[in-house]
Amino acid sequence: MKTSCLVNIFFVGVALTLGSAGCIHKPDDHITILGDANKPPGPVAPPVTGGGGTPGPEPGVPVPPEIGVTGTNVGDIPFDTNSPWTNVFANHTEDAATLKADTVYFDFDSSTIKTSEDKKLEDVAAFLKGHKADALRVEGNCDERGTERYNLALGERRALAVREYLANLGVDPRQIATVSYGALRPAVKGHDEAAWSKNRRGDFIVLVPK
C-alpha cells in the first residue's frame, strides 16, 4: 500500500510540473520591449552648418539667441557710453562708398581674418585714424547656407573679428560698432560658390555726424 501511495504521489507531482510548464504566458501585446539588440540604429541627422567654417548646433542643442543689434565690446574694451559715437545710429549720415573696395571676405563657416584681407583692414584703420570725428559700422554677412539664427550669430562673429583686428591696429574701438545681417543681404544672387564667396563678407559703412 505504501508503495502504491508513493507511486501515485510521484505521478501527481510530474503532472503538476508539466502543467505549469505549459502555462508560460507571452508578454501582453501592449508591453513595449526595450533594448532590442538586433534592431539596427536609426539614421543620425547631420549637423547644421552655417555660411562660413564651424559646424552649427546639432539637433536638440539650443541655438544662439538671434543677433542683429550693435555690438558693445571688443575683447574687454567697453563701449564708452560718454563717447561721441554712442548714438551714431540715431544721428549720422551713412557713407557706403568710401570703403566699399575694402570689403573683407571670409572662408566657408569661418570668422577668421584671412591674410589676403590684411591690406584692406590696414587701409580701413588708416582712414579711421585720419577721420576721428567719424564712426564705422561693420556689417557681418553670410551666404545662404545654414539656419537664419545660426547665420546671424556667425555674421556677428565676423563683424566682431574685424572690429578686434582694427582695434589691434590702433583704432579706437569706441569708434566702431557692429551689426549682423546673416544671409539677409546677399551681395550677389545665386546658389553656387561664385555667389556664396561674395556673400561671406564684412562691409564697412562710414558714419559721418550731421
Image: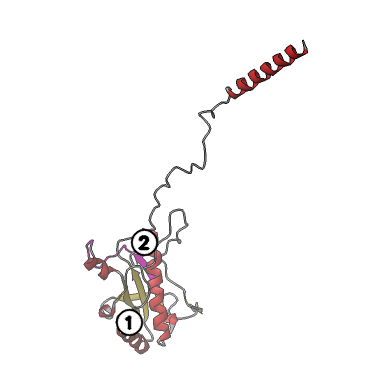
Q: Residues within 10 Å of mark 2 (few under 14, many from 20)?
A: some
Q: How crowded is mark 1: few (under 14 residues within 10 Å), some or many (20 or more)?
A: few
Residue 4's disc is: none
Give residue 101's quadrant in the image.
bottom left
Q: On the rendered image, what quadrant is the N terminus found in?
A: top right
Q: Which of 166 and 23 is in front in this view?
A: 23
Relative to residue 23, is residue 100 depicted above or below? below
Relative to residue 60, is residue 127 depicted above or below? below
Q: Which of 210 and 122 is in front in this view?
A: 122
Residue at left offset 43%, top offset 59%: 57
Q: Give the range drawn in magenta.
A: 178-191
The stretch drawn in magenta includes residue 181? yes
Relative to residue 13, is residue 72 depicted above or below? below
Query: To which residue does mark 2 refer?
Result: 49
* Amino acid type, callout 2: Thr
Residue at left offset 32%, top offset 63%: 183
Query: To which residue does mark 1 refer?
Result: 115
Q: Is the magenta stretch mostly helix, strand or loop?
A: loop
- Residue 166 in percent (x, y) is at 39, 83
* Amino acid type, callout 1: Thr
Residue at left offset 52%, top offset 40%: 34
- Residue 63 in percent (x, y) is at 45, 59
- Residue 14 in percent (x, y) is at 65, 20
Helix, strand, or loop for circle 2?
Answer: loop
Q: Is residue 156 left or right of residue 37?
A: left
